[in-house]
Image (cartoon, rainbow, N blue to C red):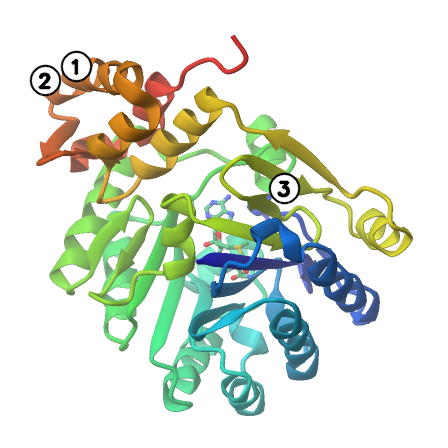
Amino acid sequence: MAGIYLHIPLCKKLCFYCDFYHIISTGDNTSLIDALNKEAALRKDYIGNETVSTIYFGGGTPSVLSVQELGALLEQIRRHYMVAEDCEISVELNPDDVNTAFLEGLRELNFNRISLGIQSWRDADLKILNRRHDSAQAERALNEILKTGFENISVDLIYGIPGMSQEEWASILDFSFSFDIKHLSAYHLTFETGTVFGKMLEKGLIAQVDEEESVALFNTLIDKAEAAGFIHYEISNFGKPGYFSIHNSNYWKQVNYIGLGPSAHSFNGYSRQWNIRDLKGYIKSVNSGKSYFEHEELDVKARFNEYVMTSLRTMWGIDLEYVERTFEKEGYDYIVNLAGKFKDYGLIRQDKKNLVLTNQGKIISDNIISEFMIPVGE
Ligand SMILES: C[S@@+](CC[C@H](N)C(=O)[O-])C[C@H]1O[C@@H](n2cnc3c(N)ncnc32)[C@H](O)[C@@H]1O
């Protein structure tokens, strides 16, 4: 079982917060599609003969591509990989790209999971974020997606946007849950270096919400999502039973995946590689047979860190039996000893043979995870 991720680095407008590799689209996608198709063929041995159980088109903005272009990419993947009959095929859509013909085209191609980038239902927030759409467009898009018969629908929201009050966040969640969505990804706004927001923060033109407020927003998120029947299965992800993102869950469960396209990451248990963050360079190198990625072999310490980092973010947590089997007594003792301290503070709880973050622990998950990391290469 393996996954394929395709990174479509094109956007019609730059969102001020976004650090994912993206550039403004010129409208001509041919050279990108050609290079992705070439890379799909070149990379097929990376996952051996494993069956592909998830395909995910992310970005950037995959919905800048036409149905024909998305279809050509899927066809190439089906030509070179063993794609499971019940493969989860997801695509991220921006609300203003959504129309009936496009959605029907996606259904014909067997896309069966939609992730809609709503971010907020408040027009003031969407303006601050420099989104292309307004809330009326997002509502129309979501209704259209439901009407076309898509069942597995996820929406993306961002909280902690400057000016967003606790009450506004609560009503954004309530309104989202008034639709028949099956999944929610909700991210706290981060100010990444190099983004417009990152630069504004450096110059003191924008401020991050304070910690107390962040905690309250996160608690509202958990309470409202759980009351609406969603399971909090990863720090930023909530799903109705049976509707967790299989693709993302596989990242956290160490399942192998190939990432195609500029900046895309790949993992096959023993190595990690990441394509260059440069569309022109990527296309040129793929076409001329030159190297377009960096590669890292993972030693046992790197694999240990990888496992702890990803598993601790999920509701399944660290599986101590797996740790003992894979990282032997030394790895097991290290984790159990360190976890003791966090258990005393109510930040980690033990659920049978699993160590799981409590809601209190989830708030400072990055700090807890970093304490578990062991220096690599020593
Ligand atoms: C790569 S983005 C693109 C998805 C889609 N093209 C769109 O724009 O809606 C995936 C999601 O990550 C989240 N995201 C990206 N950067 C973020 C940041 N700095 N802070 C919080 N959320 C962020 C947003 O919710 C976004 O929808």
- Measured from the top left, where is residue 323 in percent x and y? 28, 28
Q: Residue furthest top?
A: 378
Label 3 vs label 2, nearer the camera: 2
Camera-side residue of 259 and 323 = 323
Q: Residue at x 47, y 13 (%)?
A: 375
Locate residue 280 relative to residue 19 in the image: left or right: right
Q: Secondary structure at mark 1?
A: helix
Q: Is mark 2 within 8 Å of ligand 1?
A: no
Q: Are marks 1 and 2 in contact (CB under 8 Å)?
A: yes
Residue 15 visible (yes or no): no
Q: Residue at x 35, y 49 (%)?
A: 164
Residue 370 visible (yes or no): yes
Q: Which residue is mark 2?
A: 344
Q: Is residue 194 above or below residue 74?
A: above
Q: Residue at x 70, y 35 (%)?
A: 294
Q: Quadrant of the N terminus?
A: bottom left
Quadrant position of residue 189: top left
Q: Which residue is mark 3?
A: 196
Q: Is residue 330 above or below residue 31?
A: above
Residue 341 tag number: 1
Q: CA distance from mark 1 to mark 2?
A: 5 Å
